[in-house]
Amino acid sequence: MGRVGAGVAARTAAAGPLLLLMLLLARPPPAAAGDSKKSGAGLVSEHFSQAPQKLSFYSWYGSTRLFHFRVPPDTVLLRWLLHVSQGGPSCTDVEITVHFRYGAPPVINPLGTSFPDNTLRQASFYIRTLLSTMILGNTSVNISHPAPGDWFVVAHLPPSSQKIEVKGSVPTCAYTFQPDMLAMRVVEVSILEPDVPLPQTLLSHPSYLKIFVPEYTQELHLELRGCVSSVSPGCPVRLTVGGSTLPRNFQKVLSCTGLTPSCHLLLSSPPWGRWLQMTIENLAGPHVSVVFTAEAAFTVCRPWSVTFHHHMKNNPNQSYDTSVGRLSQNPTQWGLGRSGRVVSGPFCLLNYPVMREDTDVVSVHFQPLNGAFILVYSHMPSVMQLRLDTGMDSGGSLIIILRVNQTEVTNDTLVAACVNAASPFLSFNTSLNCTTAFFQGHPMFLSSSSHTANLIIPYPETDNWYLSLQLVCPESSEPLLYRDCEQAIARVETILYLVPCLNDCGPYGQCLLLRRYGYLYAGCSCKAGWRGWSCTDNSTAQTVAQQKAAALLLTLSNLMFLAPIAVSVHRSFLVEASVYFYTMFFSTFYHACDQPGDAALCILSYDTLQYCDFLGSGAATWVTILCMARLKTILKQVLFVLGILVIAMSLQMDRRGIWNLMGPCLFAFVIMASMWMYRCGHRRQCYPTTWHRWVFYLLPGISMASVGITIYTSMMTSENYYYTHSIWHTLLAGSAALLLPPREEQAESWTCLQKFPCHYQICRNDRDELYTVT
């Protein structure tokens, strides 16, 4: 796979997309996306693109940017052009990582965390390059003979620093990534039919063939006969069968350079129910012709089909009958004997029909029609087909659990199972490597010492998956033991389902459903220092004592708001006291709900509590500054209502934007400063007038607020969040208690304008002025 045109190559081209396309096709590129232009060799070029996305520093899978492409059939050459742009005052030469995978989103691990036990993980194919390199020239990735279907590209920046930055508080750089896919597709493809010779003549251009592989094909035999070169003996051709896939490539390449006029290739368990692409290239030179005849032959597997019959009898009890029948004949004529042995015949597998039940988004349950148990024999595999070919099943995790009764697997008897995509593994009698023609399967084993086997496949490829099981007898010199093993039957319980996240990400994680256009996939967002694909890596996790300390600090620190509440009530600022109580209440229960595991206490939904907490913080700051301005009562209350409504609207627009809260607060500060300056000019002296008001209240309150804002905007990280945010609670509440102005001097008496029989009174305050001065 190291050369262009026969695998994957990553390079940096100094030219633009137009020149790259010309190099790819060696002819004029297409005029626009989706347009095509024919060439003399029967090839067309197609161009696909997607909208650019802003890259993020990696912290979990949701911080990556996913691109979903669909490669058309009969594509012989594929090229991705990777474009990156930057914008902002603080851009640096960061490293950008781009992953590629066929059939499903790539499973990546930039943080080097551990996966759950029994989880299948394949190293993804990726390229890593600097931003400056990608900006100077277009980085490209070439794949020859790609497999048709879904291809996924994932891009991200290096792992994040875990610093919690308030949006808009510091200048940021926007790194934008956009991949373009250029495909060269052949339109002149010869159909190779089984047992029908197909004469071919090779000159300068390759010969493109394809053959349809039906279901239950056990082997495919390809042969080039009568291969003769015009200048030399032998058969100087190269046969490439199948499509390239990433991260692993099982494409078959056969160079026929011997002196014999024939060349053949045997494929065991080729992919069922699809077209198989073949390319034959001339190795003798551009002016040398090669003549040959291509032939193909199938070895077809005859399956037994286990069908489920439900019979209603005269009594209220229901009976269930399992019978085994040949697909082409009446099932009742092909049954299991009293011992359960399958009737002898030229059959190669026992097919168990499976019901697919869609339960939710990226949630599927598979159930054999005859119940949870399947019978496993020693002379032929039992096969179950799991349909994951809808295009919407590759964004979750496939869970396979096998169980067997302890009494049914004895001595050295082994129940071997293989999980494969595209076609089942059927050669248990010769090997247990689970390898088919174009897929490396995943083995599972049940024995007398291990009665349960689990397998977790994150992001399974879009295809039909197969679970095949067979009883494997040990090599023994005693014929009696071997005969007993051959006659043995094992009942295996199968639990098969597809879920968005394994165990819903556990007690220290949250399973989040992600979307890219119409494609849905899931990822785990971990808490309390837990990491990993399913939040099972506890290498940096907080201890239980640390979690309890964090919960107590974040919740009990809100009790500091009792100080401004008491001061407000004492000074007759009842509206301000109500706002402080609202802030204390919802901040306490928001942080109680924002805890991992069983420590969480949510009286409302998490989103509602978070919104109320943010609203309370903004409203508390707003009413405190306006209260310091000492406005007329009616004007102050009107501004209270209008400001809180504006803050509520801004939080709905962008909850984490700093200027959505700072804007109204700065406006309130301008009002306060204007009132203070007005009083200073009117009185010809500084306002407030007393020095102890400045020294013991205003300056300490302003200092506490400044330190709190500094901590909130620049010092919080994921590791120190629980105590830095608790300090923020304390400083915010303490500054509010210190900055509240003294109580207004009341009039000696309130005169009542009118009394009603129901004892309600309308009163007037004689001391109510435009600006109250203390």
Image (spheres, rainbow, N blue to C red):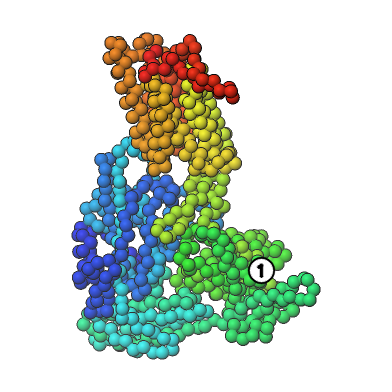
Give the x, y percent position of residue 547: 55, 36
Residue drawn at the location 58% of the way across and 75% of the way down: 429
Q: Is residue 194 visible?
A: yes
Front-most of residues 409 and 624: 624
Does 454 appear above or below 331? above
Front-most of residues 589 and 689: 689
Where does label 1 land, which residue? 371
Name which quarter of the figure residue 667 lies in: top left
Residue drawn at the location 49% of the way across and 23% of the way down: 574
Which secondary structure lies at badge 1? loop
Residue drawn at the location 20% of the way across and 70% of the way down: 28
Does 233 appear above or below 238? below
Does 217 appear above or below 594? below
Query: Quick one: quadrant of the C terminus?
Result: top left
Q: Is residue 380 visible?
A: no
Name which quarter of the figure residue 704 lies in: top left
Residue drawn at the location 57% of the way across and 37% of the way down: 544
Give the x, y percent position of residue 26: 21, 71
Left or right, 309 with respect to 160, comes to right
- In the image as oriented, which residue stretches furthest toward the right? 315
